[in-house]
Image: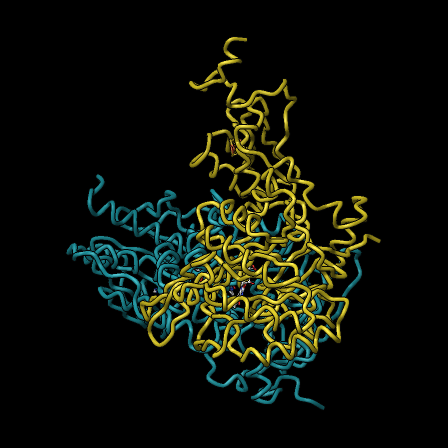
């Protein structure tokens, strides 16, 4: 059986599945239940200075997709609304009772050195395994110049990270906000400030929907709404890209990553690991299904690793990163062709209409003795994959890679007006 | 000894339960979930399988996206009796039978249930359409079954003035007198007629029979066009000894009586019932006898199961309701005396005689087109039309069972609607003759 133990910058846990800093990790009651269910670690709900913040009623909005609820979740909650001392006392007790689990404390205090210097010894005293700096909260806190307001300015990220590193022996994880044009400058700033790891993504600024009767963004609070933070399965693609960009950056490649964003199954987890993550954080999936989902994630990940012959998490971490390249490095000689398995085809015609109306008119709609038959016109197929994606039947449309004759990338391509000089000479 | 023929074999509460809706409606959230199962095929097979060609993927997508009104107009613009079709269509041989989900090895999308969801909504909210400007043309429509109603509605929609004549006391044709009670529960058929007539421009006269109270010639003189949706007035006789014994009855008449009863406890049914026939009428008669409390109901068909015109689902439904189905047995004669029939005697394919004791025998061996206007040419025993609804007489059109075809409610609707379109075109551009 695969060894799922995880070590993120010295923070150890029996498995890589941590609960992200959010309502599931708000207090001892939940965290104890989570550990009992098997979670490898938690990042405690973000602590701030006293007096605690006050939360609103009507906090979450959600979108479903085709019958599935909560494909995306958005929230307008703030950080922990409980007194600091209560949280610290509970953290201490829980850590004492679960010494083998990772217990990381998320922090967000005003952007002044004294505030950070003051809170760190209090956290250290609990015996927590590390701190995570919440530079990501995109709503409410950012309007108070905290959270994403810090995370969006690389200079602040570096400065605060430096203060924290100077103020504690604990490993420091910097949690990055996706609400930036490029994730690389803040990640570089975290590294420059001395961060031991980064975690990403925090939530994405969003308006999840508009209540058309009340004419207000959701969730509606007494007739009005505000933007919130978006998370859940829908944000996974955004998160994977950002994790991968950090992992493939030559300077950042040594920086451990805790992957977050839409992780709901072992497969999502494996994908984050492959794109460079070492530990994984989950919020929405736990809020949707409860803590027991971790059992399925552990089971699935370890069975998959056994099947692939991966002995430990480190064997998976970053496996896909060398293959995650800029567009310019992709082989333009590669060609793939759609192939429809006529035995499996149910005749829905979705591939036909997709290709006909919106792609390359490469599927013929035929009637043979009255029966519908759809055939690929290979000469027209550009291999875009659209038909295979719209086809509702598993394995019915296969994209068949054609034999490749050498590698030709855009910088060398004859159609490129700015083709590499050297090639032209040669 | 229990009465051989008796009313109220079951408590009224049990009867109410037995004759309640066999497919209760979907709730709004259930409808959305079911609607989301539709793959929205291009060139969808279900549209082709629907005789009225409802744009099924479109109406289902409208339900999925919360536009129930839009869904209803997508349905009703093709089939104004979409509400009863949602309840009575044998969808397993129509739209749902060709749903690609079935090819995928899954249950079909519940098209009929979704259609009911949308049409119920519309019926609770009034007419779906408004009439075009009046054309001043007057059309007589004879018969208020699905064909006549669909024709009348479409003509009224297009701005023509319609007069509906119905020989029976109540309008609706077999929707009112023939369809099994548990398919069209409560007063649905009547509410649907109110809904159809609410478009305006249609005047209804019941108790007025063509050939008795007026002639085709009178109508051709008084109206710009005449549509005949007469259905099938006759029933086939077996021509066997003992057929005139008391309690050897025609199934259609038995069902009509049942449909008109205000109290199902007033319907007399035998303890042991034999139903002869292999179509849906036979199934409906047999099942309704069971539901009325008959202890033994045997449906006897002269050939094998594959030749039965009742669909597989209908046959299964009968079996689930405790009906015994016997195949390959031809009726020979009926035994009994002045008190009524006591047994039905059959000859089996293997030459053996099968005698089934019976207190009630229901014959469901087919309906016939009878008593139509003699001036009309017929073909295969029905009114001949040119495929667009035109009969052999100018300005006289026909559709529905009296013309033939699938003999389904939905087919009658399609023929009535299409004939209306032909009438509309012909009225605009009169043909010679
Ligand atoms: C027992 C039974 C059960 C059935 N169950 C189903 C089912 O579950 N699903 C399904 O799809 N189909 C079913 N059908 C078939 C369906 O009911 C018919 O195909 C459909 O009703 C035909 O419509 P129509 O308008 O042509 O005729 P009808 O519905 O028969 O209507 C004809 C109308 O014309 C009137 N009329 C006749 N002659 C005259 C005249 N001279 N003057 C004035 N009015 C006249 C009649 O009184 C009647 O109202 C069933 C049929 C029967 C008999
Ligand atoms: C209701 C809610 C409250 C959250 N509060 C915090 C918080 O206090 N601190 C923090 O760093 N992230 C917070 N997050 C963000 C999550 O930790 C996580 O980064 C995000 O939800 C993405 O992961 P997911 O897709 O698994 O939910 C919150 C998320 C939710 C849904
Ligand atoms: S891969 Fe794209 S171009 Fe080729 S058949 Fe499919 S949809 Fe058409």
Q: Is residue A13 left or right of residue B212?
A: right
**Residue A27 at x, y percent in the picture:** 61, 76
Closer to the camera, A404 or B67? A404
Q: In which quarter of the image is the N terminus of chain B?
A: bottom right
Q: Residue A362, relative to residue A191: is it above or below?
A: above
Kindly tell me whether residue B404 is visible in this rendering: no
Quadrant of the rendered image containing residue A404 = top right
Q: Can residue B47 be seen in this view?
A: yes
Chain that is cyan in the image? B
The residue depicted at 38 percent of the width and 71 percent of the height is A220
Give left or right: position of B139 versus B67.
Answer: left
* Depth order, front residue of B197/A36: A36
Which one is nearer the viewer's eye here, B373 or B58?
B58
Q: In which quarter of the image is the C terminus of chain B?
A: top left
Q: Where is residue B357 in the image (x, y as percent from the top left)?
A: 72, 75
Q: Which residue lies furthest to the top in this view?
A: A425
Q: In which quarter of the image is ligand 1?
A: bottom left
Residue in the image at 62% along x and 65% along y: A43
Colour of chain A as rendered? yellow
Horizontal side of B251 relative to A154 (left or right) equals right
Q: Compared to A101, does A57 lie above or below?
A: below
- What colour scheme has been applied to the protein in the rendered image? by chain
Of the pair B23 and A409, the residue shown nearer to us: A409
Measured as percent of width and height from the top left, residue A161 is found at 54, 56
Residue located farthest toward the right when viewing the structure as drawn: A1
Figure quadrant of residue B428: top left
Q: Residue B6: horizontal and vertical position, in percent?
A: 61, 86
């Amino acid at each position: 059986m695969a060894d799922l133990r995880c070590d993120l910058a010295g923070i150890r846990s029996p498995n890589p599945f941590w609960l992200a800093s959010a309502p599931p990790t708000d207090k001892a009651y939940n965290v104890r239940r989570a550990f009992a269910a098997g979670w490898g670690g938690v990042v405690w709900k973000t602590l701030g200075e006293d007096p605690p913040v006050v939360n609103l009623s009507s906090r979450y909005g959600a979108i479903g997709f085709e019958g599935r609820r909560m494909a995306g979740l958005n929230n307008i909650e703030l950080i922990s609304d409980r007194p600091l001392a209560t949280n610290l006392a509970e953290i201490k007790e829980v850590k004492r009772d679960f010494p083998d689990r990772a217990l990381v404390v998320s922090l967000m205090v005003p952007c002044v050195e004294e505030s950070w210097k003051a809170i760190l010894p209090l956290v250290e005293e609990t015996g927590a395994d590390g701190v995570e700096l919440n530079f990501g909260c995109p709503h409410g806190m950012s309007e108070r110049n905290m959270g994403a307001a810090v995370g969006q300015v690389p200079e602040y990220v570096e400065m605060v990270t430096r203060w924290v590193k100077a103020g504690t022996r604990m490993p420091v994880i910097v949690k990055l906000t996706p609400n930036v044009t490029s994730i690389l400058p803040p990640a570089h700033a975290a590294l420059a400030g001395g961060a031991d790891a980064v975690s990403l993504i925090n939530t994405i600024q969003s308006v999840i929907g508009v209540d058309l009767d009340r004419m207000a963004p959701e969730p509606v609070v007494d007739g009005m709404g505000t933007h919130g933070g978006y998370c859940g399965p829908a944000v996974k693609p955004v998160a994977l890209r950002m994790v991968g960009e950090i992992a493939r950056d030559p300077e950042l490649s040594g920086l451990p990553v805790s992957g977050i964003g839409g992780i709901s199954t072992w497969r999502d987890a494996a994908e984050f690991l492959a794109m460079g993550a070492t530990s994984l954080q989950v919020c929405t999936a736990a809020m949707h299904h409860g803590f027991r989902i971790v059992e399925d994630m552990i089971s699935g990940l370890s069975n998959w690793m056994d099947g692939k012959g991966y002995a430990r998490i480190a064997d998976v971490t970053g496996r896909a990163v060398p293959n995650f390249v800029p567009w310019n490095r992709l082989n333009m000689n590669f060609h793939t062709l759609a192939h429809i398995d006529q035995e499996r085809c149910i005749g829905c015609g979705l591939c036909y209409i997709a290709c006909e109306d919106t792609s390359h008119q490469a599927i013929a709609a035929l009637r043979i003795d009255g029966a519908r038959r759809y055939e690929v016109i290979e000469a027209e197929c550009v291999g875009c994959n659209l038909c295979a994606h719209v086809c509702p039947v598993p394995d019915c449309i296969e994209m068949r890679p054609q034999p490749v004759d050498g590698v030709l990338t855009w910088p060398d391509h004859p159609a490129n007006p700015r083709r590499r000089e050297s090639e032209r000479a040669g | 000894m229990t009465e051989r023929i008796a009313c109220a074999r079951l408590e009224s509460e049990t009867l109410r339960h037995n004759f309640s809706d066999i497919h209760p409606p979907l709730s709004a959230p259930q409808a959305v979930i079911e609607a989301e199962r539709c793959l929205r095929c291009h060139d969808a097979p279900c549209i082709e399988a629907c005789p009225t060609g409802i744009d099924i993927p479109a109406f289902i997508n409208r339900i999925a996206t919360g536009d129930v009104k839009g869904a209803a107009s997508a349905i009703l613009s093709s089939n104004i009796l979409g509400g009863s079709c949602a309840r009575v269509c044998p969808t397993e041989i129509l739209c749902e039978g060709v749903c690609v989900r079935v090819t995928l090895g899954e249950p079909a999308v519940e098209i009929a249930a979704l259609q009911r969801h949308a049409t119920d909504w519309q019926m609770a909210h009034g007419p779906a359409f408004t009439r075009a400007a009046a054309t001043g043309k007057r059309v007589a429509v004879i018969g208020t079954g699905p064909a006549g109603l669909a024709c009348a509605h479409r003509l009224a929609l297009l701005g023509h003035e319609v007069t509906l004549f119905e020989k029976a006391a109540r309008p609706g044709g077999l929707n009112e007198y023939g369809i099994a009670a548990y398919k069209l529960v409560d007063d649905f058929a009547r509410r649907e007629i109110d809904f159809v007539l609410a478009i305006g421009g249609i005047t209804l006269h019941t108790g007025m029979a063509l050939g008795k109270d007026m002639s085709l010639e009178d109508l051709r003189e008084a109206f710009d066009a005449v549509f005949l949706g007469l259905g099938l007035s006759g029933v086939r006789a077996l021509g066997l000894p003992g057929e005139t014994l008391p309690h050897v009855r025609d199934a259609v008449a038995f069902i009509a009586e049942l449909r008109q009863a205000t109290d199902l406890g007033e319907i007399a049914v035998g303890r042991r019932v034999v139903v002869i026939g292999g179509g849906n009428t036979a199934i409906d008669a047999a099942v309704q006898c069971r539901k009325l409390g008959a202890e033994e109901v045997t449906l006897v068909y002269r050939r094998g199961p594959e030749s039965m015109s009742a669909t597989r689902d209908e046959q299964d439904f009968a079996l689930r309701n405790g009906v015994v189905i016997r195949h390959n047995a031809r009726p020979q004669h009926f035994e009994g005396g002045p008190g009524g029939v006591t047994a039905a005697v059959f000859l089996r394919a293997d030459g053996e005689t099968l005698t089934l004791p019976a207190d009630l025998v229901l014959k469901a061996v087919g309906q016939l087109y009878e008593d139509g206007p003699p001036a009309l040419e017929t073909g295969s025993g029905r009114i001949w039309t040119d495929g667009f609804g035109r009969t052999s007489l100018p300005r006289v059109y026909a559709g529905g069972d009296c013309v033939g075809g699938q003999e389904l409610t939905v087919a009658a609707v399609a023929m009535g609607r299409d004939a209306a379109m032909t009438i509309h075109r012909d009225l605009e551009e009169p043909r010679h003759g």
